[in-house]
């Protein structure tokens, strides 16, 4: 019997699904009957008129379909019925109403970096906001209203051109929407708080009535409960965010420090001095450790800092062994753009596990990291940390947030990367070993960690809701019941509506 690969099988399934598609207008018309006509002869609809898809629409068979349906993490292959690239808010309203009227599963997508492939769905509709690119910056008011389609590099660049900044994650190609709505941490977190803490408003397309959709404005005065929920639990749970308004901060320049230790011989001392220094030093300093099989990397960004200050703040770590150290001084926009790795140079498949630490790791935990990294499935696989601790992220923003991990001293994450981009199935042989390595690595660290990060979802976790949102789970379910009582926005780990 011929071997049918996973991808071939999925493509075949999608082709059947796509073949069954009737023109959207026909389906929409069939979804609901007009109750009569008005004086001009136009039909009167019981709820709302049948929706038609608008915007840039891509279906199976279109030349763009393969690239339009591909996510950043090629481990997950999905074949949607249709992808709508919205060009404005009305396109999003139409797409949501259409999916409801035609009983088609929907997913929301921006930067495509969902680490479980949950911004795409077989045989459903993907409502993609990535072409909503705008940036309206008010330098005097220190606010910026941006389209939900900006990625992090675009947002950092647009703000930096005006000498401004907001917290984002480190990888430029990640969607600003996806990162912010789940929390969003990076080098500026200790100084400015989480990205979601700086979110002060949004336009959101929500489900309306039995089968419609509408756009609503959210800020500290209007629908304050929904703003609270969007700050850390907004990913595909309550509605489709079409624009985000941030409080932004002036930032003229940064000092960017990189240090490299060859091998893992210094790991115990480097890790221990880092976890006792980086979370507790000057809040302008954001820092990360990235531990690979054959080297340890330290990155630090000091907002409005000098080289001497950056070296001094990280001196206890830099004093371990003989690292190679470089420091660059520059504008945040150029430094951020400079440390980006082109997507095509990254492995095709990735699997991560997110964890927060509230206490320093004891020597046994650091030994677990060393022993797992020594047998990592590939050189790209790594153990990543981001300093939290003392800093703006430890405080709730005005209005509060669903993001709960305020007392973490650092975030940590084992990650496996394998396979070659553009070469289908290239990683398949390594997939079982890479998945097992992550599962066993993260399980071994569980005695030393607490909670998980919804933006890096843990599929192998039973109590995922509590791990992501702690004591906020019940409030999130109640807010879900208000804005999405029919649970239109649902996926593998979405917030369910409260039942009473
Ligand atoms: C290489 C890499 C590096 C990363 N580094 C960091 C980091 O430094 N800091 C950090 O905090 N996180 C980091 N992350 C995690 C990242 O924040 C999440 O993967 C994020 O959810 C991706 O958002 P996206 O828009 O790119 O992805 P998508 O796949 O488009 O969406 C992700 C989720 O958000 C939902 N969503 C997207 N747009 C909207 C919208 N407009 N309205 C409602 N829901 C929406 C989707 O439905 C989906 O559930 C990293 C991820 C990767 C892959």
Image (cartoon, rainbow, N blue to C red):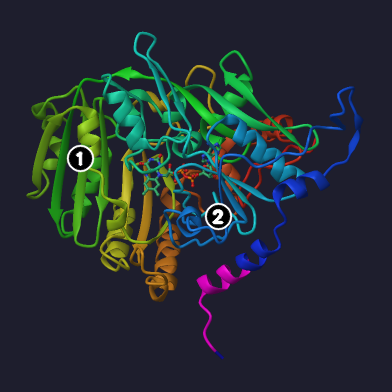
Q: Residue 10: within the magenta?
A: yes
> Cα distance, mark 1 to mark 2?
36 Å
Q: Can the viewer see residue 283? A: no
Q: What stretch is highlighted in magenta?
A: 2-13
Assess whether mark 2 and mark 1 are in contact (beta carbons under 8 angstroms).
Answer: no
Residue on which disc 2 sits? 461
Residue on which disc 1 sits? 338
- Secondary structure state at the residue bearing disc 1: helix
Q: Can the viewer see residue 128? A: yes
Q: How crowded is mark 1: few (under 14 residues within 10 Å), some or many (20 or more)?
A: few
Residue at left 65%, top 34%?
A: 93
Along the line of sight, the residue nearer the viewer: 41 or 95 = 41
- The spot of residue 259 in percent (x, y) is 14, 45
Relative side of 252 to 154, left or right: left
Q: Residue furthest bottom?
A: 1
Q: Look at the image and tell me in which quarter the C terminus lies.
A: top right
């Amino acid at each position: 019997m011929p071997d049918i690969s996973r991808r071939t099988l999925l493509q075949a399934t999608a082709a059947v699904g796509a073949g069954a598609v009737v023109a959207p207008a026909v389906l929409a018309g069939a979804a609901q009957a007009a109750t009569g006509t008005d004086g001009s002869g136009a039909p009167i609809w019981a709820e709302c008129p049948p929706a038609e898809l608008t915007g840039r629409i891509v279906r199976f068979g279109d030349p763009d379909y393969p690239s339009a349906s591909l996510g950043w993490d090629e481990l997950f292959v999905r074949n949607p019925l249709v992808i709508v690239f919205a060009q404005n808010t009305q396109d999003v309203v139409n797409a949501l109403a259409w999916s409801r009227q035609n009983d088609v599963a929907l997913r929301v997508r921006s930067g495509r970096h969902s680490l479980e492939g949950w911004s795409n769905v077989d045989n459903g509709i993907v409502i993609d906001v990535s072409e909503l690119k705008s940036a309206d910056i008010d330098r005097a008011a220190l606010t910026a209203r941006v389209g939900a389609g900006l990625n992090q590099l675009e947002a950092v660049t647009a703000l930096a051109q005006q000498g401004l900044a907001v917290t984002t994650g480190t990888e430029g190609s990640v969607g600003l929407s996806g990162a912010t709505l789940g929390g969003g941490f990076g080098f500026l977190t200790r100084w400015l708080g989480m990205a979601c803490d700086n979110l002060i408003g949004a336009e959101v397309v929500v489900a309306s009535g039995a089968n419609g959709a509408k756009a609503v404005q959210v800020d500290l005065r209007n629908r304050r409960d929904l703003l609270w929920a969007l700050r850390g639990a907004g990913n595909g749970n309550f509605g489709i965010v079409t624009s985000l308004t941030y409080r932004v901060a002036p930032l003229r320049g940064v000092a960017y420090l990189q240090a490299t230790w060859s091998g893992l011989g210094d790991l115990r001392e480097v890790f221990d001095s880092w976890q006792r220094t980086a979370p507790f030093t000057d809040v302008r300093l954001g820092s990360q450790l990235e531990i690979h099989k054959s080297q340890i990397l330290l990155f630090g960004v000091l907002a409005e800092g000098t080289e001497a200050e950056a070296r001094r703040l990280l001196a206890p770590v830099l004093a371990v062994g003989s690292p190679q150290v470089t420091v660059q001084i520059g504008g945040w926009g150029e430094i951020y753009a400079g440390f980006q790795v082109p997507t095509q140079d990254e492995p095709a498949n990735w699997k991560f596990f997110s964890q927060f630490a509230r206490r320093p790791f004891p020597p046994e935990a650091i030994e677990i990291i060393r022993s797992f990294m020594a047998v990592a499935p590939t050189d790209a696989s790594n153990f990543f940390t981001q300093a939290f601790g003392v800093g703006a992220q430890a405080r709730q923003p005005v209005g509060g947030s669903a993001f709960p991990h305020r007392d973490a001293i650092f975030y940590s994450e084992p990650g496996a990367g394998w396979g070659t981009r553009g070469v289908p199935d290239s990683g398949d042989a390594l997939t079982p070993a890479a998945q097992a390595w992550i599962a066993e690595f993260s399980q071994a660290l569980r005695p030393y960690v607490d909670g998980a990060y919804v933006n890096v979802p843990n599929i192998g976790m039973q109590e995922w809701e509590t791990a992501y949102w702690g004591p906020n789970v019940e409030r999130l379910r109640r807010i879900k019941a208000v804005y999405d009582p029919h649970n239109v926005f649902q996926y593998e780990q979405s917030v369910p509506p409260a039942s009473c």
